[in-house]
Image (cartoon, rainbow, N blue to C red):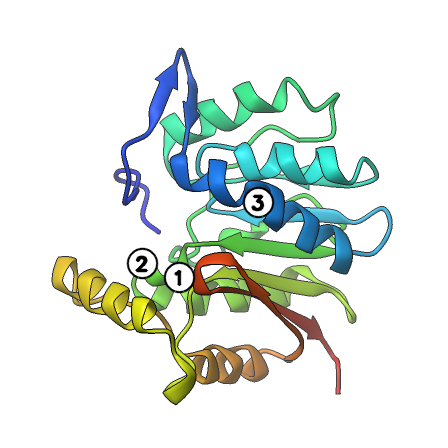
Amino acid sequence: MTGSSPIALEDRGQTGARMSSPSAGRNRDVIAAALASVLPQGSRVLEIASGTGEHALACVTERTDLHWQPSDPDPASRASIDDWAREAGGRIAPALDLDTQQSGWWQAVPLPLSAVFCANMIHIAPWEAAEGLVAGSAALLEESGQLVLYGPFLEGDATAPSNLAFDASLKSRDPRWGVRARDEVEALAASCGFALTQRLDMPANNLVLVFVKGAP
């Protein structure tokens, strides 16, 4: 992600500072349920590229023991996140200005953390954003900390035709974008000390991938 302008492949509604994402409206509840099933009790979660903030609110509503640290490089998105956060009873911290393509971005994140979560970012950003995400997560998390990714992935011959079409569409917009191959994401994670421990099928041919630092 870059700090210049928000990247959204949809039209978003807006009332005051608060934005509404059609895609978040469709997937926020299933994402919240998936994360509720994998995050340890009392987890402190950093979300990268939080967008409108609707995922953050859904997750802390599903699991009231979670503490959520949202972030986004876009000022309008951060304002929206903070507006949605007013409904969370203090369990969503003020949104941070983080860009995973910036060197040392993780130094601005309060510790401790249990997990880093990122939804629908690495396919609409250069690969360097994914590299920065994983490297920063490794710097932030202790052993057994989780890096959780949500979105579409290429899985060789098992790839859904819709994800192949989406990949082609993204690359036509920006050749640096594209649906990422799961094995390449796994290799990147492994290079920073993470191992894939769970793969969850999600609606619309998306996945939740759970990586654990230091797992065998």
Looking at the picture, which amino acid does disc 3 mark? Ala
Measure how far apart labels 2 and 1 are at the Cα level. 5 Å
Contact (CB < 8 A) between labels 3 and 1?
no
Q: Residue at x 58, y 78 (%)?
A: 192
- Say which of 43 and 136 sits in front: 43
Q: Secondary structure at mark 2?
A: loop
Drawn side of residue 209 relative to residue 97, left or right = right
Q: Is residue 115 above or below residue 90?
A: below
- Say which of 207 and 93 sits in front: 207
- Say which of 83 and 32 sits in front: 32
Question: Disc 3 or 1, which lies upstream in sequence?
Answer: 3
Q: Quadrant of residue 140?
A: bottom right
Residue 158 in the image: x percent, y percent? 42, 84
Tag shown at residue 108: 3
Q: Residue at x 53, y 19 (%)?
A: 83
Q: How many marks?
A: 3
Tag shown at residue 122: 1
Circle 2 is placed at which residue position? 125
Looking at the picture, which amino acid does disc 2 mark? Ala
Measure how far apart labels 3 and 2 are at the Cα level. 21 Å
Contact (CB < 8 A) between labels 2 and 1?
yes
Residue 153 in the image: x percent, y percent? 42, 71
